[in-house]
Image (cartoon, grey):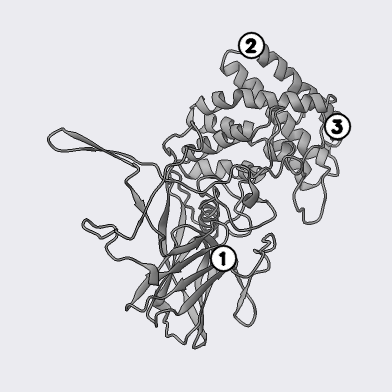
Amino acid sequence: NGWYNHQSTAVWYFDLATWRERPAFCMDVRITYEDGSVETIVTEDNWKTTLSPVIFNSIYTAEHYDARLEQPGWNQPGFDDSTWKKSFYRSAPSQQIVAQQLHPIRNVEKVKAKDFTKVNDRTYVYNLGRNIAGVSQLRVKGEAGTEIRLKHSEIRRPDGTLYMNNIEEHYRPTDDSDPFQTDIFILSGMGEEVFMPRFNYKGFQYVEVTCSQPITLTQDNLTGWFMHSDVPPIGQVETSNPIINRIWWATNNAYLSNLFGYPTDCPQREKNGWTGDANIAIETGLYNFDGITVYEKWLADHRDEQQPNGVFPNIIPTSGWGYDWANGLDWTSTIAIIPWQIYLFYGDSRLLADCYENIKRYLDHVAELYPSGLTDWGLGDWIPVKSKTPVEFTSSIYYYVDATILANAARLFGKNDDAVRYASLAKKIKDAFNNRYLDKETGIYGQGVQTELSTALKWGIVPDEL
């Protein structure tokens, strides 16, 4: 089902998306034989279908699998499909159907359990020793009809059971049939069976296995699979300091755990394409991985989601949620910053050109709303530990960044009038910002807290003479 047919209910209302639809299958396979002849096999009205052992799947929660419904040999020549139903045609969801160009999501790394605990003869808790995004794989024997639940979490309680409150807080289930991050596997009773979800992923370190019947498991019965968009690694950091090396490794693992066809904020609680999160991670990604195709696809999503007046939602893709809250300059500047970073890293201006008019429409809307050059449209420094920087401070800086990027892009593409116009806008913002927040005697911005000093330096809004 993926995000296209979201069934689990949460605060972002993907289950109510106007574009939600039941997935369909379209195939066009061209086979070239050794003699040079070509055969084309396409989906037609003589194809058949039937229900599979996957009785429920949700990208947000988990997968339910009833092994008793398996049909051995269904994918082999000569299989008797006389009980299968005839498939039916449906219209394509869009005329803009293209082949997937970004790197596929794969099971990239197998992670063995570091230890496990037998709570009782029906409950076991496995520890992978590290946080991953992905799935668990279970090998098990048992009686037909035995129900096994695999609950995934990042934290254990002191008693060893799993703590879920921190990751299920946005979930709004209507009943108990779809437990959060909990796969359900029903045994067929046909010897050793292997279960691994196909249509879901989770963020976890611990797996709690509970069975409806007593069962015997060992540490080797469960393994984890680290999943992500399989982008090729291109950067390497190795120093004489093992702590720095480990920080680099952990940072990359965190980045990959949030790369599933688009950059996300977390692999468990939300799995959303929060724009602000991607902004701060773009350089980490591009220094270490060849991820251009992921961002090209995601920025196409940006263009699809933009409203006629230029406004973007705070999460992309969206069900329609996020156009009225949390979508100010500090978050949705992805439309300018990411194409510009792609250009800087790759020397490829195509994505920047594709997004040029979208950036322009966005900035023109902001300029109309905030003629002074300062704006408080945004979330601000999100969840600060001690200090609080004004929203106007951070949002105005991103306003300046976007205007500067658009002016630079205009010069790159030979749009001289736009280059002058948006360079003038950037100067207006910079002057207004420094007049409001910079103490020119001390060189201190605002209250002098870390956010205020670092963002001003990072984004180059400090006057040249300082």
Q: Quadrant of residue 224?
A: bottom left
Nearer to us: label 3 or label 1:
1
Give whichever of discs 1 and 2 has the lower sequence position.
Answer: 1
Q: Position of residue 228 (x, y in %)?
A: 47, 52
| Residue placed most toward the observer, 212 or 311 | 212
The answer to which of marks 3 and 2 sits earlier in the sequence is 2
Question: Which type of secondary structure does the marked residue at label 3 adopt?
Answer: loop
For label 2, the residue is 416
Q: Is residue 126 left or right of residue 327?
A: left
Callouts 1 and 2 close, C-beta under 8 Å: no
The crowding category of the residue bearing disc 1, from other C-alpha atoms within 10 Å (few below 14, some 14 to 19, many at least 20), is many
Q: Residue at x 80, y 24 (%)?
A: 368
Residue 464 visible in the displayed image: no
Earlier sequence position, callout 3 versus callout 1? 1
The residue to which callout 3 is attached is: 440
Image marks 3 and 2: residues in contact by CB distance under 8 Å: no
Question: What residue is pinned by disc 1?
Answer: 181
